[in-house]
Image (spheres, helix red, strand yellow):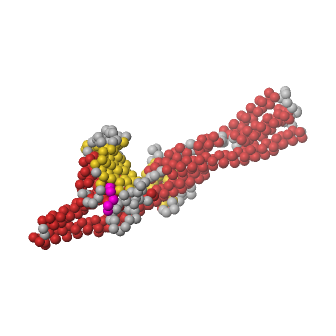
Amino acid sequence: MALLNTMHRIARLTGVYGYAASLTMVIVATLVCEILRPFLLPINLLMVYLLTVVLVALKIALKPAIASVAIGGFIYNYLYVPPRFLFDFRSKEYLVTFFGLLITGTVISSLVTKARERAEILQVREAETASLYHLSRELAVAADIASILRAVVNNVEESLKAQIAIFIQRGEQLEKLAASEELTLDQPALDIVVWTFQNNRACGHGTDSHDTAKLVYFPLMALSKDMGVMAVKLAEDSVFTFSQIYRLLEAFAAQTAMALERVNLSHQAEQAHILRARQKLERALLNSVSHDLRSPLATITGVLTSVLEGGDLLSEQVRRELLENAKEEATRLNRFVGNLLDITRLEARGAVLKKTPCDVQDLIGCALRAIERRLKGRSVDVKLATALPLVDMDMTLMNQVLINLLENALKYSPPDGAIEISARCNDERLIIRVADLGPGVPENELKRIFEKFYRIQVPESVKGTGLGLSICNGIVEAHGGKIWADNQAGGGFVVTVEIPLQAPCRDQDNNHG
């Protein structure tokens, strides 16, 4: 709107209206001189006419100002140069006064007009710059094509009071994706849109191509490719000259093309990132298949082979131990496949929580029983606050969280290192901590360990896929909670899980070890 307001402010009376206004101002100046005549000399009254000439040149135009000089000169000489009420062309005084006023007034009018025009050009350029800046700010925050086109349409309508349609290339076709509500384009206009896109040239009204068209067309040319076409219908009573309109719309088209290219490049970069992530996932899955699937299957196959081929040679106790070992490996294999399914559901936001009131002690007990054989020789200290209420949660998923945290503690801590599990309430939230005596994690990697497939530098003997903590993070967030990791001051590593409660509870420790 600033540009439009500026143009209205500096709009001039043209044609007969300008001359009529200048004549009116000369008449007003004459009336003022008649009022002042008893008090001033005739030469002083001349200043009133010169002031009138300056005002006409400043507010109207050069030619009306020159006309006011001539008219004012005749009136001044007729009324105030002796002998009054007579045109005496033979008098030197008369001729000097008349031509002196004419020359002086013309020079002053010319100088004032040039100064005014320069000032107006600066005002228009300033308003154009402000309009472009306003558009560039909106385009900078636009995140998609629809937002970009909406910003352009709004700016053209507000700045120029014009109607606009924007066509974007989609495949082999140009589609109209944004337009002013009142603007409709017939088939000849659509043909010009195609011509503009194919020839990369502005055309239409006021140009040397398709100059009989009612609209002006600009190609949206970016650095990498042509994006589309912008068609603009100017208002019939526009206060802008075509050169002003053309310059501004050309800048609008350039900014629009750059913004569209930015969104396209951003989309391409996002697709490339997704492709790299997919490739990384494929590599990780292949690595997982090579170890986390092959190792349990090899163990199970070996056990079953021994049992089948050993027959009566194996004692009942040995046979039972072998079968329990196979069962544990099958359970681990099932848990790994479950992890893959969990991460897939969480990424697709398809995990549906089946919340029921759950006992925290039962939750921890189930997790410990699931990995009981792997905990042999380990000291596990469980600390539960008294009066822990039932907590609304998905028991199966939260059990998976604890299993993953316990397996992490087993993998990354010394074989004889103790593990501590604690649970308490604080401000309507349940807080569960799993701590071990491992080496911990570098401070700059504490947040990254919850990223999918991210693993810190560890010995080759420590196997894993980098999915466990990522799954924990997704499940906890699905419960409306949060999870974070810290290094313990005295050595060791701790992961804290916090999820909301339905009822408050007291924070009193009760050890069960």
Magenta region includes residue 418? yes
Q: Where is residue 378 in the image (x, y as percent from the top left)?
A: 29, 58
Choose top left, top right, bottom left or bottom right for residue 471: bottom left
Q: Nearer the viewer, residue 413 or 340?
A: 413
The answer to whether residue 282 is visible is: no
Which residue is at a point 46% across and 56% down the rendered structure image?
Answer: 263
Q: Nearer the viewer, residue 106 or 356?
A: 356
Which residue is at a point 40% across and 62% down the rendered structure image?
Answer: 456
The overriding secondary structure of the stretch rendered in magenta is: loop
Left/right placement of residue 366 relative to residue 223 reads left
Specify the quadrant that holds the N terminus: top right
Which residue is at a point 39% across and 53% down the rendered structure image?
Answer: 485
Choose top left, top right, bottom left or bottom right for residue 377: bottom left
Q: Which of 366 and 212 is in front in this view?
A: 366
Q: Which of 280 and 85 is in front in this view?
A: 280
Left/right placement of residue 99 relative to residue 7 reads right
Q: Position of residue 76 (x, y in %)?
A: 81, 35
Q: Where is residue 334 in the image (x, y as percent from the top left)?
A: 24, 60
**Location of residue 433 with respect to 39 vertically, above or below:** below
Q: Position of residue 307 (x, y in %)?
A: 14, 69
Which residue is at a point 48% across and 62% down the rendered structure image?
Answer: 225
The answer to whether residue 364 is visible is: yes
Please count the marks in the image. Answer: 0
Q: Which span is picked out in magenta?
A: 415-419
**Location of residue 76 with respect to 341 vertically, above or below:** above
Magenta region includes residue 152? no
